[in-house]
Image (cartoon, coloured by chain):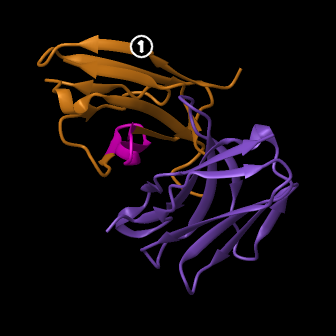
Amino acid sequence: RKEVEQDPGPFNVPEGATVAFNCTYSNSASQSFFWYRQDCRKEPKLLMSVYSSGNEDGRFTAQLNRASQYISLLIRDSKLSDSATYLCVVSDDRGSTLGRLYFGRGTQLTVWP
Amino acid sequence: EAQVTQNPRYLITVTGKKLTVTCSQNMNHEYMSWYRQDPGLGLRQIYYSMNVEVTDKGDVPEGYKVSRKEKRNFPLILESPSPNQTSLYFCASSLSYRATYEQYFGPGTRLTVT
């Protein structure tokens, strides 16, 4: 079983739409959570960290549900420039897996005009 | 400019011919890591290093070697490349091994082994 599972999509939405991605993780001891964005054939870049209380950055909202072991990303008012693959990332800050990072396979988003 | 650099960016080689992909960062980061990305499988960690002279295996270390003799460099070595190592490789660095810190990725190295 993969450590981090994501719906690969693709999600095809019109400009202005709201879209949500979910991600589940298998290790209940995981401590840190992130969403990265990857444009086609480019390197991943941090979109936002995910905090226990949930956090917002402009049109993007990330939430964490530790009890159910899932993370979500909500994008409001989608722009053409949001078209990319979104990677869910989970890591452990302690124990034998200290330093390990686990990436989901990514969810592909296409925003059309 | 703060960055992670990788060389070469593109490489086509033959089975069994040893190769090294270099990775260098200028941000004085403690943590460095190598990943491979394959269609349908996502990014998988190959090796990582929490500091100089400290390296550990990730998910898919077989067929790869690394070394961390100095803080800024973390080369990936393929002693005897095989076609199943054809992939897109990314090096990344982070301020600390504490995983709460952002990973900065290099531009990637596209390797083809024939």
Q: Is residue B10 magenta?
A: no
Q: Is residue B25 left or right of residue B64?
A: right
Colour assignment, chain A: purple
Which span of residues is magenta-colored?
B36-55
Q: x, y percentage for residue A74?
A: 74, 63
Q: Chain of mark 1?
A: B
Give the chain letter for orange: B
Residue annotated with mark 1: B8
- Residue at 23% x, 12% y is B13
- Residue at 40% x, 20% y is B22
| Label 1 residue SS | loop
Relative to A64, residue A56 above or below:
above
Q: x, y percentage for residue B36?
A: 37, 37
Please name whichever residue, B15 or B33, is drawn nearer the observer in this view of the structure: B15
Q: x, y percentage for residue B95?
A: 60, 43
Mark 1 residue type: Pro
Q: Is residue B63 left or right of residue B88?
A: left
Q: Quadrant of the C terminus of chain B?
A: top left
Q: x, y percentage for residue A91?
A: 50, 61
Q: Is residue B20 left or right of residue B24?
A: left
Please name whichever residue, A81 or B105, is drawn nearer the observer in this view of the structure: A81
- Residue at 34% x, 66% y is A96
- Residue at 31% x, 31% y is B67
